[in-house]
Every structure is written in structure tokens, then in C-alpha cells.
Amino acid sequence: MSGGISAIRGFDYQATVILDILFDHFDQHGLTAQVRPEGVDDLDLHWTDAVEECRQFIQIKKPRENNNGDRNPSPWSLSEAINELFPNTIKQLNGNGYTQIWIVGDDVNDDLRSLVEAGVNAPISYGEAYWDVIHRLARNDATKVSKLKEDIRKKIQRTPFPKNLPSDPATTLIAIINEFEIFAKSLNAGDSLIDVYRDKATQLHASLPDILQRIEINPIYGTEQEVTQRVHNRLAQRYNFCKYSHYPTDYPSKWDNDARR
């Protein structure tokens, strides 16, 4: 049951954040602004800049809580981003000029932040984290599409990440593919697994640096109550809306009397 409650809280948080975002979206892009909640991502934004069609995907993760629903802050790690954030982002940003925002209720750790900020320079300036992402995503993809016995699958999922990688990205790509091939063959995992890993790692290295520079992380976005208050404040400022936190019991007569004063 706790999982169901957590999911409901996640939907509530997502809906509140979406409302907060839409203020700026329509203010900035006017009549060209379009929106689709729960489209390809939690929120898809569309607009036209001059004659260019623009699109932005937004993924929303609520602040972490324990089983009792109490705040349990913990920074997002690189491993968590590989499992929960990167797969859809890469799929959505590959081969286009679109952008992605990760809105997370908690902070992100230094590895994840530095990797995204490195952008196109990530293979050189932040190589270990960059190649870790390549390796794990390629490995995950390979194990999903390849027919493996469960014991072999578990061992492949624990494939060690190569150490002392070369500084040259092209050489490093070859090195991690070779390391994976040696490990997979030691388990008799089959050539198809190796082929999928090689293809996926190569594709990722060709696209990920450009994708990284089109990702924005918006951490510590706020609790649902904090975001709700921001939305309320914006409504109040824009429309002089809600002098009262709740409508008076004798609405509309008391409301009208106040308005006439």
C-alpha cells in the first residue's frame, strides 16, 4: 500500500510542478506555446522561435520520502540517473536539437552535476563518469535484448568497469568494448550480446556529448507545499486572486462587500 500512496504523492507533486512551469512557458512564448502533460515525458513543451519549431521535455521527480511520508533528502547519484533519467532523455534528444530539463526535489551529487555541465567536453574533461554511463547503458541494453540464462544475466549486470582508461576517446571506446567482450566470452554469453553492446556503446559515444549540453538539471525544486505556495503567490500577484486562503462562508456577498471597500 505504501507504494501506491507514494505513487499518488508523485502524481500530485508532478501536477503542481507542471502548473508552476506553465506560467513561464505561456509568458515567454505567447500564442505559439503548446503543452502536453504525460506526453513522451512528464511534460512536453512546444513553441515557435521565429520560424524554428522548439520542443522541451521535462522529467519530474518528487522529493524523497521514507515509508511514513517524511522527507528523506538524498542527492541523486550517477547510478540512479543512468537507471531513471538518462534512458528516456537519450531517446528523446537523439538526432534533433530539442532540450531536456530534469526537475528533482532533491540535490544531485558532484559526479552527476559535473558530467552534465561538461557537455561536449565530457569524454575528455570528465572521462570516468562519461564512460561509466556509456558502459552501463550499453550493458543494460544488451542484457534486455539478448536471450541469457538468469545466472549469466546477473553476472553480466556486474561486469566490472575498466580501470586506467586511455585519455583518447576513440581508444577508450575500443578498450571498454574489448573488456566487455573478454568478460562475456568468459561466461559463454554468446556473440549476439557482444554485438549489441558494441553497437550501443558506439551509438552512445556518437550522440551523448551533444545530448549532455542540452540537459538542464533543476535540483531542490521544493516540496509540494512549497511549490503550491509559489503557484498561489503567482496567482495572487497576477490576478489579485484570493485575499483569503479559502473563500468566505458567505461568498459571494462578503467577497463583494470587501471588493467595494
Image (cartoon, rainbow, N blue to C red):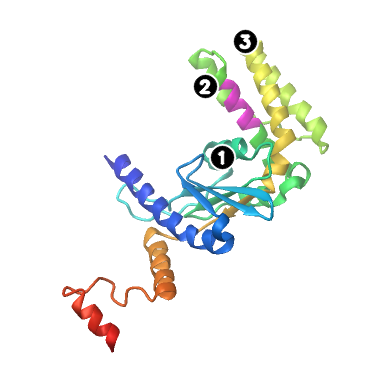
Residue located at (38% from left, 76% from top): 240
According to the picture, the residue beneath numbered tag 2 turns out to be 154
- Alpha-carbon distance for marks 3 and 2? 13 Å
- Alpha-carbon distance for marks 1 and 2? 17 Å
Residue located at (43% from left, 75% from top): 237
Location of residue 231 (image quadrant): bottom left
| Mark 3: amino acid | Asn
Callout 3–callout 2 Cβ contact below 8 Å: no
- Alpha-carbon distance for marks 3 and 1? 27 Å
**In the rendered structure, which segment of residues is drawn in magenta?**
135-143
Q: Main secondary structure of the magenta part?
A: helix
Location of residue 188 (image quadrant): top right
The image shows residue 142, relative to residue 107, as above or below, that is: above
Location of residue 183 (image quadrant): top right
Q: Quadrant of the C terminus?
A: bottom left
Residue located at (29% from left, 50% from top): 68
According to the picture, the residue beneath numbered tag 1 turns out to be 79
| Percent x, y of residue 203 | 71, 29
| Percent x, y of residue 234 | 44, 70
Q: What SS does tag 3 mark?
A: loop
| Mark 2: amino acid | Lys
Chain-order first, disc 1 or disc 2 = 1
